[in-house]
Image (cartoon, rainbow, N blue to C red):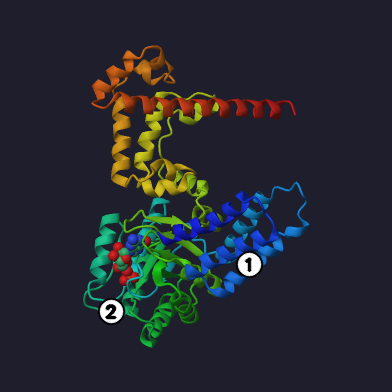
Amino acid sequence: MVLQDLGRRINAAVTDLTRSQTLDEKAFDGMIKEISNALIAADVNIKLVSQLRKSIKASVKFNELPPHANKKRIIQKAVFDALVDIVNPHQKPYEPKKGKSNVIMFVGLQGNGKTTTCTKLARWYQARGYKTCLVCADTFRAGAFDQLKQNAIKAKIPYYGSLTQTDPVVVAREGVEKFKKERFEIIIIDTSGRHHQDEALFAEMVEIQGAISPHQTIMVLDASVGQAAESQARAFKEASDFGAIIITKTDSAAVGGGAISAVAATHTPIVFIGTGEHLLDMEKFNPQSFVSKLLGMGDMQGLVEHVQSLKLDQKETFKNIQEGKFSVRDMRDQLANIMKMGPLSKMAGMIPGLSNVMGQMNDDEGSMKLKRMMIICDSMTAKELDSDGKIFVEQPTRITRVARGSGTSVREVEELLSQTQMMAGMAKKMGGNMKKMQAAQKNP
Ligand code: GDP
């Protein structure tokens, strides 16, 4: 994905500079130039890039840095903040209210992923306890209603549309009225797109808006549109004054800079990003998380939210870690959780360092590996599972027995045990630190 390539280039520029022998102002300017080139190549608007250059230069007054300052940290932070500033519109999106009917209308050109995203968003709210439904007011594209219906059925979301009514304004109004009466809390309206921006589309959009008075209008923008994204967003903003953007297809081979420029040009927040074709492939957008993921620093905040939304059973693991313990059984529970979390490639971007561990493995190979690790655990006795793995070092015949029993190899069993021991070591450290913190709180 090219967004990742952009991140890699920016990261490499910062790392090269901070590793170089001569960390002088000339090298610093060179780094800013390389970052600017990478952004321009990724279709970020030139004006924004020059703004970023100025802001990095202004926040790192290179000649005034004290001799012992941690230059690397200062430069990294300046680059990070400047990138966050580009994608941060400094505007808060609409927050749906519980117990009320929140009407959300989607706009965007055909093929950008509007219909798919309507269902993703409906599912997202449904999973968070809102009474949610979908209305298909796209009477322009043959098959649009059918597509929305299929998606809605799959996600078990009530829907409304018509195969005979050709006026989208009527369908939108009827659908919204029906669902409001039935006290739905989130009513999402999919509207028509066109291949190109045209007057008829904009006139229709304005009419639907007038008929249903949405609380929020969201524009769907394909990450791969490139430079055209900015003018597209401006035109839609003028006609529909949308209050939020969802960028789709950030997973595909696409240049995402155009979409970033669109956000900056319209001062409108990105609320979610689409990360795949499936219903669950959507992430909440947060400027800091986005940039840290872009730069390969891992998105722990996104991960925590993702894990919480899955309502995974953490069993005793967290408690054990707090106490400085970690057993093979904890390892097994966590493996089971990782398998529930979704495609491994997606998770890898969220956990610092995991993309390196995954190496060249694709999702299928990765989950096969996890499955084999689980089978290994399942071939152990309760005593072995509850140990931190040292018992295998003391009695190595246990390793051969487990390998034979699970149909795997001695090497694979050893690998699992060494992972567990590494985790146990980390748990011990963390548990110790926690105890120290607790003691400090008791005796300040
Ligand atoms: P619409 O014409 O704007 O309603 O677009 P659709 O919802 O029909 O989507 C067009 C195509 O884009 C479909 O094949 C979707 O599966 C695909 N699509 C939508 N969102 C994403 C995404 O985030 N990632 C990827 N890879 N494909 C997507």
Which mark, by number, is residue 140? 2
Residue 110 coordinates in the image, percent (x, y): 33, 74
Task: Let me know if residue 136 appears in the view.
Answer: no
Task: Let me know if residue 329 appears in the view.
Answer: yes
Would the CB of label 2 be found within 8 Å of ligand 1?
no
Tell me the residue that label 1 is attached to.
53
Q: Nearer the viewer, residue 376 or 98?
A: 376
Q: Residues within 10 Å of mark 2 (few under 14, many from 20)?
A: some
Quadrant where ligand 1 appears = bottom left
Quarter location, residue 337:
top left
Residue 18 coordinates in the image, percent (x, y): 62, 51
Could you tell whether 206 is left or right of 287 in the image?
Answer: left
| Residue at figure coordinates x 35%, y 18% from the top left | 382
Does residue 303 lie above or below 223 as drawn?
Answer: above
Q: Circle 1 — which element?
A: helix
Q: Nearer the viewer, residue 355 or 93?
A: 355
Residue type beneath disc 1? Arg
Residue at mark 2 to residue at mark 1: CA–CA distance: 45 Å
Which mark, by number, is residue 177? none
Q: Circle 2 — which element?
A: loop
Residue 304 coordinates in the image, percent (x, y): 49, 44
Verify CB contact (< 8 Å) between mark 2 and mark 1: no
| Residue at figure coordinates x 39%, y 82% from the top left | 197
Residue at the farthest front position: 21
Q: Residues within 10 Å of mark 1 (few under 14, many from 20)?
A: some
Q: Nearer the viewer, residue 208 or 219?
A: 219
